[in-house]
Image (tube, rainbow, N blue to C red):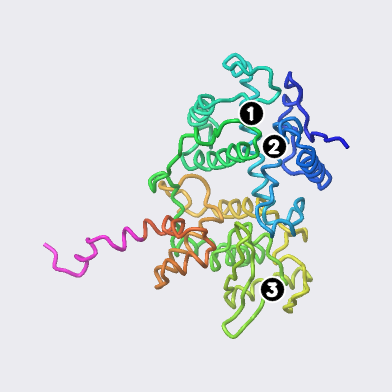
């Protein structure tokens, strides 16, 4: 029996020059090849770096099985709840690796371990620090500007997780994940994603006579759903009880929750499905997607997210040029509004956090930060007092 590296790299690093040609997802056959190689090295006690290349390890990290639910999932299915997350990890790590490749001459001159065909096995803490410095200053963000601190923080989390994985798998000898500088994000670093009731209403009113646009927007605005959750929602997951309609979804981290769908929102969904010739009677066996494109295709999470941003931009409403906002208003703004509107109507922060499917209540606190500051400002005590 022999093992085979999925993406072999020779000592001259010839293959990795075409870094942009590497896929953001693997075929089932490629995944199985990685699994067979893993079984081989465990059985015959082969050193992991002898069986897997650097690129292999990027895919192994993205496709690792963390919990029992992952064993039931089709790793290559575009509708998979982890599919988009995997693609993000792979994209980020290939970008990191591409930077190492572009600077391989400097790296090889700066280390004594030039015999290794693996760049990941020769980098040291100072190289990671230099990478983070470059990431902060390089004009890679929106409009040729450097990345925002929030973006740096997200990239650092992915890279830290990858380096920790490499160390735990004994692919690298030193715990390089401890060498990364933490990108602590404060409230001042976060983008302004607050949107008012009046602004939401203006957007909805603009698309009142456009069934597809209106249904997507009203569903997002009144449910707190993520764009990815709406894109992958299916008709069979809708049910009704004495209180109304409920949509069962699988959110981030494979966390299942039920989202309340208002009756008039349900009616909008039904009318849209009628126009498309789809079933409108609740049916737990109906595997069709809740929302379909004009071409009767399901939305990918990225497609739906971009579609929402574009349809809002097309309204050209005056408030879209608000100076405190950076970039387009996206689907995510509706989640912020859902949290704020719920709070204004008496919901406690724990209930809001649960309804939104947040892993931590701290995330919900970020959503409500500006509202909470204003609500507790002592200046409000003067509101009904005599003035000078």
Query: Image point 80% across, 40% down: which residue?
Result: 40
Q: Where is residue 180 in the image (x, y as percent from the top left)?
A: 50, 34
Q: Where is residue 15 in the image (x, y as percent from the top left)?
A: 76, 25
Query: Image point 44% across, 67% down: which residue?
Result: 350
Whether residue 205 appears in this view of the structure is no
Secondary-structure class at tag 2: helix
Q: Seen in the image, is 38 located left or right of residue 349?
A: right
Q: Among all residues in the image, which is located at the extreme bottom?
A: 242
Q: Mark 2 points at which residue?
A: 57
Q: Distance between the residues labelled 1 and 2?
A: 10 Å
Label 1 with label 2: CB-CB less than 8 Å: yes
**Is 377 colored magenta in this rendering?**
yes
Q: Is residue 330 above or below residue 270?
A: above
Q: Nearer the viewer, mark 3 or mark 1?
A: 1
Q: Where, by quadrant of the figure, is residue 169 drawn?
A: top right
Secondary-structure class at tag 3: helix
């Amino acid at each position: 029996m022999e093992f085979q590296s999925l993406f072999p790299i020779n000592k001259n690093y010839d293959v990795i020059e075409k870094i942009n040609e590497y896929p953001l997802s693997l075929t089932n056959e490629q995944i199985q090849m990685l699994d067979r190689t893993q079984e081989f090295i465990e059985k015959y006690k082969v050193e992991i770096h002898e069986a897997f290349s650097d690129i292999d390890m990027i895919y192994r990290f993205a496709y690792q099985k963390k919990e029992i639910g992952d064993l039931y999932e089709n790793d290559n299915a575009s509708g998979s709840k982890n599919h988009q997350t995997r693609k993000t990890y792979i994209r980020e790590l290939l970008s990191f690796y591409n930077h190492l490749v572009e600077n391989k001459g400097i790296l090889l001159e700066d280390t004594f371990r030039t015999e290794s065909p693996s760049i990941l096995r020769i980098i040291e803490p100072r190289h990671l620090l230099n990478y983070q410095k470059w990431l902060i200053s390089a004009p890679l963000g929106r409009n040729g500007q450097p990345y925002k601190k929030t973006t740096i923080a997200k990239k650092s989390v992915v890279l830290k997780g990858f380096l920790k994985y490499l160390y735990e798998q004994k692919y690298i000898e030193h715990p390089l994940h401890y060498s990364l500088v933490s990108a602590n994000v404060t409230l001042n670093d976060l983008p302004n994603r607050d949107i008012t009731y009046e602004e939401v209403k203006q957007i909805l009113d603009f698309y009142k006579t456009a069934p597809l646009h209106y249904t997507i927007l009203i569903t997002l605005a009144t449910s707190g759903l993520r764009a990815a959750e709406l894109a992958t929602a299916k008709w069979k997951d809708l049910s009704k009880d004495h209180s109304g309609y409920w949509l069962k979804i699988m959110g981030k981290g494979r966390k299942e929750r039920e989202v309340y769908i208002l009756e008039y929102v349900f009616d909008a969904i039904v009318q849209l499905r009628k126009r498309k010739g789809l079933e409108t009677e609740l049916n737990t066996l109906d595997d069709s997607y809740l929302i379909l494109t004009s071409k009767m295709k399901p939305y990918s999470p990225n497609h739906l997210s971009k579609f929402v941003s574009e349809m809002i931009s097309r309204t050209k409403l005056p408030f879209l040029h608000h100076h405190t906002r950076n970039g387009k208003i996206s689907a995510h703004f509706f989640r912020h509004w859902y949290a704020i509107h719920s709070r204004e109507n008496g919901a406690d922060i724990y209930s809001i956090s649960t309804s939104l499917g947040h892993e931590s209540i701290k995330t919900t606190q970020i959503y409500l930060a500006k509202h909470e500051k204003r609500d507790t400002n002592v200046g409000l005590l003067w509101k009904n007092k005599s003035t000078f």
